Amino acid sequence: MKSKTARILVVGLVVALLVSLLSGCSGGKSQTAPTPAKPEKKEEKEPIKIGTVGPLTGNAATYGVSTKKGVEIAVDEVNAEGGINGQQVKLISEDSKGDQTEAANATRKLVEQDKVAAIIGAVLSSETFAAGPIANDGKVPMMSPSSTAPGIPDIGPFVFRNCISDNVQAVQVAEYAIKELKLKRFAIMYTNNDYGVALKNAFEAKAKELAQVVGIEAYNDGETNFSVQLSKLKAKSPDALFIGGYYTEVSKIAQQAKQLGMKVQLLGGDGFYSDKLVQLGGDAVEGAVFSAGFYSGDTSPDVVKFVKAYKAKFNNEEPDMFAAQAYDAAKIILTAMKKAGTAGQALRDAIAATKDFPGITGTTSFAENGDAVKQIVILKVDKGKFVRVK
Amino acid sequence: MSAYQQQILILTGINVISALGLSLISGFTGQLSLGHAGFFGVGAYISALLTTKAQLPFALALVVGAFSAGLAGLVVGFPTLRLKGDYLAIATLGFGEIMRVLALNLKITGGPVGIRGIPHSTWPSTVILLAVLAYLLLKKLIDSHVGKTFIAVREDETAAEAMGLDTARVKISAFVIGAIYAGVAGGLYAHYIRYINPSILGFMKSIEILCMVVLGGMGSLPGTVAGTVILTVTPELLRSVSPLISQYRQVIYGVLLIVLMLCRPQGLFGGATYKRERHVPAWKLWGRRESANDIAQR
């Protein structure tokens, strides 16, 4: 390739990219006025668009993919019943790679280019912190099914959340451990990220109030050796160990604690909730008690129906908490749409007014700021299976 | 232009400013830096802290943020007096990680949660203006006699020193200027996305920027801009093509990088400014036992 032709080619490519960005990819839709000018009859035929934002690729993909699948089940259900007041619902799923900038881009695309009526997402809290303001500015209701960080619903009036925040679940686990399990001396380990820190702070505050916290140690995701932290905690002779982290590390911590001869009741948050916990942890995690937003072994007809539809559509895969919370979030939004239509403000108000919505993750209402008020599920590992204790 | 396109334009502009900084350090002065996101993060965090906690006006915060990043550049610049090549790369990588761990563990930076509620002060005009200014300033610098000293250090440090050049000063100033560029970009980013957390300081972010510079061509300003535009816009364009393709957009993106590097290992614009050796495309080497260098030297 001669250098001159190469340069021309490159310049041409760059210009083409820019031009297609500026004009092509929007298909000319952006030229039309934002809302009122559209002809009425076209509105009736076009499906209602809703979007999801979450990591479909990258390290956190498992959460994003589950979220997308959960929403797909909800959309399928609504479309099979004839759609929203005669209009079908179309789902547009965007990938965020688990990166906040990508989540912001994806949300901007859904709001400005696809003009979706509502968004289910984002999945990770960091993504929602970046994506939320964009949906809020565009007056498009956004409901995160899984961003548990404190402060998410306070981003703006259009940002909702359909899961229990880290501080609420940690407080409930602390109360359960102290009142029901009669534990007194707590040790805490947490992963040093937003999730772990939020769980630790809330648990520590509640446990100090009602009982005693004897030691706190941090670790980083991906670490495999926890003997230093565990030895320090063992010296303080705790009777319970609360771990604010994910099952991968939790299973290793549990095994190493057992090797060190620590006799503690394991406690945790929804990061425990995966079949992998038992697969990796074996009998070391037996008896562990943790909070969750959903229990797939539930026998209520709605849960059974959801699990059946999910397994049928996705190759006999077991739905996880992310899928269930996303399904409920989508159902809440679609139900609100049936009542109030798809216009931003009306839809937002209808979602905010949702009261005692009977979902598969419990009955849901919304607090003033858009945070979900729902019951928490407390699960226990019993002979390698999860059973609900509260 | 829709707000979505505007957003990509802004992010491209921010990346251009940051990549230009790295282009000076790695492309022109030949100091491989793997910690560019560290400078970017310093600019982002300092300016965001100033506007959220101290209620400083954005312009002032941006300047202070850029200045702090420059200071960090000075700190990193010093080891370069003793380190070369791989060792320098590792040292800069360490700097980036230190910055990330600091942001992760300090109270004032919000720890892993980061800083949110940063005022929205970055507008398209600001970014375009600053990006153009950054480009013109760097071009002026490179074309001046000072610019030749950067290139001299890259081409042959010993020879440059023998010619009486204070190579230490040249390298440090490259790091300081490059870091200031990254700091400005970081400040703009924080006040556009309105939320930052330690992930913006991650190693992968440094690599992303380095990819833009290498893809465009080391030691070429238009190349840096081209590389940045391509790597920022392509993933977004692939979103809009069709659901089938957008599903594999990360794969396509990776394949694109590999193909480009195979066809033009010196980068898109590389070698255009300063010709060093004739390039032989990869496919011509297929099945031959001679190395690329043998053929090029013929």
Image: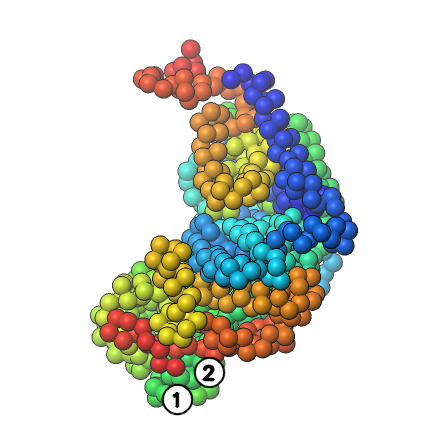
Examine the image and state in which quarter residue A343 appears: bottom right
Q: Residue at x 67, y 28 (%)?
A: B144
> Is the residue under label 1 in contact with that under label 2 (CB below 8 Å)?
no
Q: Earlier in the sequence, mark 2 or mark 1?
A: 1
Q: CA distance from mark 2 to mark 1?
A: 12 Å
The mark closer to the camera, 2 or 1, is: 1
Q: Outermost residue, top direction? A: B298
For the residue labelled by badge 2, is the local secondary structure a helix, a strand or a loop? helix
Residue carrying label 2 = A206
Q: Is residue A190 visible?
A: no
Q: Position of residue A48 (x, y in %)?
A: 61, 56
Chain letter for the residue marked with disc 1 in the picture: A
Left or right of residue B212: residue B12: right
Q: Are marks 2 and 1 on the same chain?
A: yes
- Element carrying mark 1: helix
- Return the residue nearer the eye: A353 or A272: A353
- Tag 1 residue: A179
Task: Residue type at mark 1: give it.
Answer: Lys
Chain of the residue on which disc 2 is drawn: A
Disc 1 crowd, CA 10 A, few/some/many (<14, 14-19, 20+): few
Question: Closer to the camera, A178 or B280?
Answer: A178
Q: Is residue A379 above or below residue A347?
A: below
Figure quadrant of residue A159? bottom right
